[in-house]
């Protein structure tokens, strides 16, 4: 089969690789009909995340048709069913899964020992996302083996296109969780850093959850325009002071809820902290650029909440933790517990409350994927979200 394969920094190739097969009775094989390039994939493309190996198949946002089912998964799945596959692999039986904390499943990370050493305790297995999360082959391919397939799936009813439901596997529930864990009140202003795909879903989630005002911060014109179309007030940080504008928009009090939809590769104008971050990152003295986190801690209203769906990989520096402690800020963060949210979100799609396909700007063949990685990373051609068709 064809798949997008990691060969090193900024080196993704469309290779011919062996077809996957059933390895465990709870497995299923899915023929991929649509997949996407996620912002988190760019952390692997640029090799900011540890644990990648040459030959790894990329991708964790995909869907398709079930073509083979293991003996122990046949009660939950049938050949021919359409499914979205969440990026988080979960067993449904461990203590964390029973609590709904699917992204920290205790059984699905088959490289648990290595992850324990790095994180203290391993998190769940993830598709196409380094050997620290299990080293599972990803979904930017013609076929995918899905472990724990009796749990790790979302069935798709008739009448919905791939484009409407594909993002149930990652960015839609990620944006929703980012907003939901803020416990938004009707009087709240929610500020969101980053208007990429997750940021766009977060904007619309915050509005659906009843925020009084949503403010979106970015510098890319196409992303800012899409944010405004979704109901947000926008701040272009390349041409405006984020701190001054947020104070203007909140009567000097700051937003109650702040969401980091950027993560470890934060961009900023030539501020001292961002210059230091880039220098330390280049010298391998720091893994992540934390400008957005620092700015959120500074502008957030005392007793407010910081929500962090943006991915971080390791070490950050010069974080004013005393500021956060003295202001009484609550931190909520983590990989998405996808299936905690998907029943509700699928119903919202069916009812017409939201059509997540609005974020798609480019649809190409799988073999065109390597070039689209660069286009997406460099924000060329108005690119916000790429869908690949195997």
Image: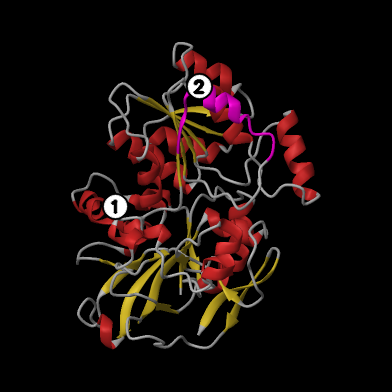
Q: Is residue 303 visible?
A: yes
Q: Which residues are magenta?
A: 317-331
Vertical comparison of 230 with 69: above or below: above
Which of the pair 209/65 is nearer the observer? 209
Q: CA distance from mark 2 to mark 1?
A: 31 Å
Which of the pair 57/258 is nearer the observer? 258
Name the spot of residue 114 as percent of width and height, x first: 59, 68
Occupied quadrant, residue 40: bottom right
Q: Residue at x 36, y 53 (%)?
A: 357
Residue 329 shown in magenta: yes
Name the spot of residue 336 as percent of width and height, x first: 40, 53
Q: Is residue 236 visible?
A: no
Vertical comparison of 78 with 284: above or below: below
Q: Residue at x 39, y 87 (%)?
A: 22
Asked whether, in this view, residue 11 is left or right of residue 157, the answer is right
Vertical comparison of 261 with 68: above or below: above
Q: Residue at x 64, y 35 (%)?
A: 291
Q: Secondary structure at mark 2?
A: helix
Q: Residue at x 41, y 87 (%)?
A: 23
Q: Could you say which disc has been placed on residue 327 in the image?
A: 2
Which of the pair 28/90 is nearer the observer? 90
Q: Secondary structure at mark 1?
A: helix
Q: Residues within 10 Å of mark 1 (few under 14, many from 20)?
A: some
Please name the residue that numbered disc 1 is placed on: 341
Name the spot of residue 184 as percent of width and height, x first: 32, 31
């Amino acid at each position: 089969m064809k798949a997008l394969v990691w060969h090193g920094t900024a080196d993704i190739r469309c290779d011919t690789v062996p077809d996957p097969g059933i390895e465990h009775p709870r497995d299923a094989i899915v023929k991929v009909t649509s997949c996407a390039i996620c912002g988190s994939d760019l952390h692997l493309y640029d090799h900011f995340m540890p644990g990648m190996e040459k030959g790894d198949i990329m991708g964790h946002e995909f869907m398709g048709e079930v073509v083979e089912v293991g003996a122990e998964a046949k009660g939950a799945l049938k050949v021919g069913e359409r499914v979205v596959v969440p990026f988080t692999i979960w067993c449904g039986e461990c203590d964390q899964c029973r609590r709904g904390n699917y992204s920290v499943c205790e059984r699905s990370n088959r490289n648990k020992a290595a992850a324990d050493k790095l994180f203290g305790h391993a998190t769940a297995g993830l598709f196409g996302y380094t050997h620290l999360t299990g080293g599972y082959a990803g979904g930017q391919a013609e076929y995918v083996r899905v472990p724990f397939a009796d749990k790790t799936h979302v069935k798709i009813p008739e009448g919905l296109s791939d484009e409407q439901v594909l993002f149930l596997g990652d960015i839609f529930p990620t944006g929703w969780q980012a907003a939901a864990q803020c416990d938004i009140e009707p009087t709240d202003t929610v500020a969101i850093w980053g208007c990429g795909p997750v940021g766009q879903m977060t904007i619309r989630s915050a509005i659906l959850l009843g925020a009084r005002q949503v403010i979106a911060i970015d510098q890319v014109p196409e992303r800012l325009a899409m944010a405004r179309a979704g109901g947000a007030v926008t701040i272009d940080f390349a041409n405006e002071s984020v701190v001054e504008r947020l104070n203007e928009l909140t009567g000097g009090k700051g937003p109650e809820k702040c969401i980091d939809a950027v993560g470890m590769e934060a961009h900023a104008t030539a501020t001292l902290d961002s210059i230091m971050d880039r220098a330390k990152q280049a010298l391998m003295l720091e893994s992540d650029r934390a400008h957005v986190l620092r700015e959120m801690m500074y502008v957030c209203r005392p007793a407010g909440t910081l929500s962090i769906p943006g991915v971080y990989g390791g070490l950050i520096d010069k974080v004013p933790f005393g500021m956060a402690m003295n202001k009484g800020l609550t931190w909520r963060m983590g990989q998405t517990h996808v299936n905690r949210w998907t029943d509700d979100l699928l119903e919202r799609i069916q009812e017409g409350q939201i059509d997540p396909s609005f974020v798609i700007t480019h649809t190409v063949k799988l073999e065109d994927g390597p070039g689209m990685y660069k286009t997406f990373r460099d924000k060329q051609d108005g690119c916000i979200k790429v869908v690949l068709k195997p």
